[in-house]
Amino acid sequence: MKRVVFLAAILTFYDGISCIGGNKVLLEDGGAALLLDFGTNFGAEGRYFDDFFQPRNTFGFTDLLALDLLPPLQGLYRADLEYPEVWQRCSAHPLFRKVEVQGVLLSHAHYDHCGYLPYLREDIPVLASLASAFICKVLQDTGGGNRLQDLCYAVPRELKDGLIQTVRVTKSNPAPAVQRPFRVFGCTVVTPDAASFWEQCDASRELCCTPLMACSGEAEVAGLRVRFWPVDHSVPGAGAFAVLTSAGWVVYTGDLRLHGKHAYLTRQFISEATKLGPVALICEGTHPEVERPVTEEEVAANCFEAVKRESGLVVADFGPRNVERLLSFLEIAGETGRRLALTAKDVYLLEALRAAGVPGVPDPYTDERVVLYIQPKAERRKWEKALLARFSECAPERTVDAAEVKADPGSYILCFSYYDFHALLDIEPRGGTYIYSSSEAFNEEMLIDHQRVRNWIDFFGFRLYGTLGRDREKSGFHASGHVHGPGIEELVETVRPEILIPVHTENREFFRRFEGRCRVVFPEKGKPLVLG
């Protein structure tokens, strides 16, 4: 089958339709083709898999293709993950065709936007903020489990004994991992600190580095002009894009909000996007039903009051890369005479963001409010050993274990989540405060996890602040990372696109209110949308 070359600007939506997350949008114009995100659709995956039953890496991307979780686009995926005859099996799929993609525009480093990057050809450039690139590296460096983690660098695989397996390192074959080419926005030059972190490799396998390419706020990819703006979201480095096509500017919001501490970034994006007079606006709509969202300032104030009232142990449970929330708890720790106990993964993330030059991120090695919680492990991975060595050299007096926390629980705020609860059995708290500062359950699997969290809270006699279960957070202990209904109206009314395309939403009805003011198109999976 020959590759299809469109003579007009075309958008094809392969996911992120009538659901939250999993965005995979292909933009084609002439011979150019770009992907707007390439994320995991956890809802769709959850129909077939769970934490302990995952797609088989030994069959590359075959399982995901067979279940229609990846689009059947030959030429898009890594050759070393291509199981024999996989494309013969897919050739009858109605959406099967060949493509040649010249770049991925990554809006931010949440798995529902970046989670399927590991399957893409390792030579396809990824365009993102510097912070997003570094978070991708953190996710891979510290990741574990059965999920393929090759977000930032591709660990070579080979077909052996009828299965796709990791190439083993030997003296004669070092088989280095190959770093994906990243073009990073938000900086004119790559600093020595940034370059050093990018090349850092605390693993048994060598890393074949591809230097970062700085491109400030604009770049050209396959003849298409691409613009990037930072926006406010619940993870550092989030951004929105605009691509100049033959039909006009196509604007993609990624995920954003107007009620965070950096809402001004989102407003700057809206102002700049308006000047483009876009032909299309691809807009997120996670929470259009929310009229007035809880702000980050309200969350910080409410958490402060809860901590101030507690004389015993405090556990703070929030999203693993919600650095804004981490910084709020760091301030609270300082104001209440406590120390913030971070895990090794937290410290590594802060290292990365400091190397990326993210403003306001503290140095965990020198900040007296930070301690590193050491969990007992029979075996530690090399990145963690290296980090513990760095911390022990710089601040040996600021490492703590269960015995020290147990002896003086009122001196700490533990940054723990569900997967850290084993440590509570060692600390043996008698009462205390548990602040659940994360999102509500949006599917049955998360609902079960929330019930387990509740069981642990009840077992130790914690006082709970925050909302568990399906109920929307109304108690003031969590601020969403997504724009609310009036914010979406402000965005659309200000930018005034010719075509409005809602994605990342389960609420189509909300967007019908814009009909008459612009053309509203609800995309269909795999059906090309011609612009112009």
Image (cartoon, grey):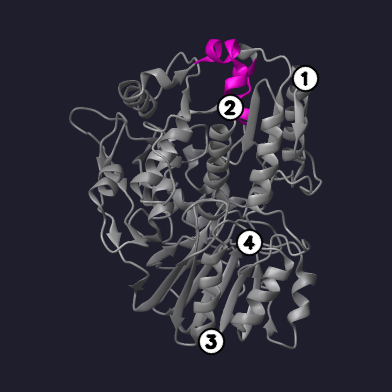
Q: Give the secondary structure at mark 3.
A: loop
How crowded pointer 1 is (Cα within 10 Å; few <14, some 14-19, many 20+) is rated as some
The residue under label 3 is: 277
Proximity of marks 2 and 1: CB atoms separated by less than 8 Å:
no
The residue under label 4 is: 16
Q: Residue at x 77, y 19 (%)?
A: 461
Cα–Cα gap, marks 4 and 3: 25 Å
Q: Give the secondary structure at mark 4.
A: loop
Task: State which tag comes first along the sequence, 2 or 1.
Answer: 2
Q: Nearer the viewer, mark 4 or mark 3?
A: 3
The residue under label 1 is: 461
Percent across and percent down for residue 318 are 62, 39
How crowded pointer 2 is (Cα within 10 Å; few <14, some 14-19, many 20+) is rated as many
Nearest the eye: 102 or 191: 191
How crowded pointer 3 is (Cα within 10 Å; few <14, some 14-19, many 20+) is rated as some
Q: Give the secondary structure at mark 1.
A: loop
On screen, residue 121 above or below 368 = below
Q: Nearer the viewer, mark 4 or mark 1?
A: 1
Percent across and percent down for residue 6 are 46, 82
Magenta segment: 401-424
Q: Amino acid at mark 2?
A: Leu
Cα–Cα gap, marks 3 and 2: 48 Å
* Number of the label disc, if any, that sits on residue 414: 2
Proximity of marks 3 and 2: CB atoms separated by less than 8 Å:
no
